[in-house]
Amino acid sequence: MTSSMPVPYAFFDVLADAAEKQTLRHFRINIAIDNKEPDDFDPVTDGDRNAETAIRELITQSYPTHGIHGEEFDDVVGTSPFTWVLDPIDGTRAFISGLPVWGTLIGLLQNDRAIIGMMAQPYTGERYFGNGSQSWLQDKNGTRRLKTRDCFDLHDAIMATTSPKLFKAQENDAYERVESCVKLARYGLDCYAYAMVALGYMDCVVESGLKAVDIAALIPIIEGAGGVVTTWDGEPAHNGGQIVASANARLHQIILDTLSNRAGSRLLRT
Amino acid sequence: MTSSMPVPYAFFDVLADAAEKQTLRHFRINIAIDNKEPDDFDPVTDGDRNAETAIRELITQSYPTHGIHGEEFDDVVGTSPFTWVLDPIDGTRAFISGLPVWGTLIGLLQNDRAIIGMMAQPYTGERYFGNGSQSWLQDKNGTRRLKTRDCFDLHDAIMATTSPKLFKAQENDAYERVESCVKLARYGLDCYAYAMVALGYMDCVVESGLKAVDIAALIPIIEGAGGVVTTWDGEPAHNGGQIVASANARLHQIILDTLSNRAGSRLLRT
């Protein structure tokens, strides 16, 4: 696998190691919180900024022709088809609450396609990694291949969303049509929910208002485990927006149909 | 400390070790889910039952005069003032979703007072422990004393609740009065939220419909870290019901006042 990849797996580990040194210094220790938007609660920590700086330096050293798009700093425009998409602490609300369900997101785009991604949770020691064809979890128990679940009925599905209160009025009806069908809904997870879909323990994530940095790294992990990630309209997800991630194509179509209220969804629910 | 305790700390570790062998065998591996109540989603796993059996055997061997009240099996009536209150997997919804925010709850009552408690999260390797006077977290980074946060204004508080959709109509208004004031609300955490209050990273938990096994073990941990746990009416919490846990007595009173819509709460918000 590694030979056909434009960047080896080991380099993602190097980046995650560098990020971890910065983020763990601040997790459950001492956080300076700035509000980027005074009227909206959006905490950014020193750990976030320092981790992104560390990752950017390593990328620039090893891949000077690559572009970089990160949460915290200005874009670097590359001279190759490759662009890194970075969010050092996805799930800042979990982070400041002491919860180990945030993650460091490191994604690589080739032109407009998310081809490799890692989600690292340094406190638990988990690293989820995928290249669109295969995905793995490396944790204290070793390394295992990831496989999404064979859940083909929304009524059997475990769903996640950041918060059911985040949807705007017109979106909320669509979202509630899905949530009202699922077996169980979980809130407050951000990237960790997508990792659980890849791991085969959740079946779908339905969110809106995502940025590219929130989702790009997760696409190759979900796809490599057998899942599907698109916008609510079925378009490519790497730029963010309204996002659905599902354990498989059949469940994904049911969710898209339910969101858009297409009658066809009933036929698919076997 | 240990000398004045009717049961040494080390015995709680023995119980948590025994429970962990059973719960981790099922976490993210292979779960047989039974529905105790067919119309309500309440998963119970083999891990839950096997862990409680293991804990009960050890208690009966070492403390044959103690009573036992657990989630999964019938009560053992003791001949001493001491009763163990057990929930091997608190947060079964998190457990079946692959999320490491469930916990094993082991509490000890002396007559009607919760005097010692442990919350253990075996995947992350965390053990929160308190005796009402002092509390600690033991994790991969070592052992640290726990201290709740000096948060005295609800507008600065991070709050948790299992789900904002669990409250009944009349409770919901009271709950929403609190949530509408806080800086940040987190959902889906069960016992892990109480641990975060003791750790000083969350400031309050507001819930209803708790059972004794959901809360008894957590009371000495919160209290030992400087926090307060009561019912919404300010009564002892060890039997469950409508529960508030707060980082300190001043914040606690503000929350009780806000829940009951007493005007005095405004005076206390300095």
Image (cartoon, coloured by chain):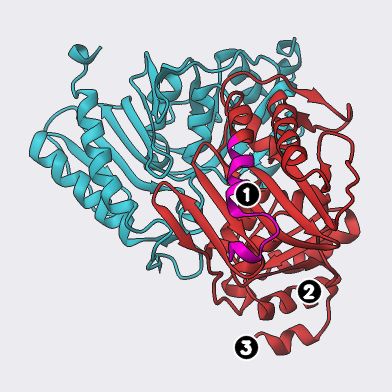
Chain colours: A red, B cyan
Q: Give percent across and percent down for residue A36.
A: 86, 29
Residue A164 appears in view = no
Judging by the rendered image, the residue that carries numbered circle 2 is A256
Residue at 66% x, 46% y: name it: A188
Residue at 50% x, 24% y: name it: B199
Q: Can you say which quadrant of the picture contains the N terminus of chain B?
A: top left
Q: Can you say which quadrant of the picture contains the C terminus of chain B?
A: top right
Q: Residues within 10 Å of mark 2 (few under 14, many from 20)?
A: many
What's the residue type where badge 1 is placed? Met
What's the residue type where badge 2 is placed? Leu
Q: How crowded is mark 3: few (under 14 residues within 10 Å), some or many (20 or more)?
A: few
Q: Does the magenta stretch include residue A13?
A: yes
- Using the rendered image, report if marks 3 and 2 lie on a common chain: yes
- On what subunit does the disc labeled 3 rest? A
Q: In which quarter of the image is residue A236?
A: bottom right
Whether residues under marks 1 and 2 lie with C-beta atoms below 8 angstroms apart, the answer is no
* Label annotation for residue B136: none
Q: How crowded is mark 1: few (under 14 residues within 10 Å), some or many (20 or more)?
A: many
Camera-nearest residue between A21 and B137: A21
* Label annotation for residue A119: 1
Residue at 43% x, 61% y: name it: B43
- On what subunit does the disc labeled 1 rest? A
Camera-nearest residue between A176 and A243: A243
* Label annotation for residue A270: 3
Whether residues under marks 3 and 2 lie with C-beta atoms below 8 angstroms apart, the answer is no
Q: Is residue A157 left or right of residue B80?
A: right
Magenta residue span:
A1-17
- On what subunit does the disc labeled 2 rest? A
Separation of marks 1 and 2 at Cα, in angstroms: 25 Å
How many marks on residues? 3
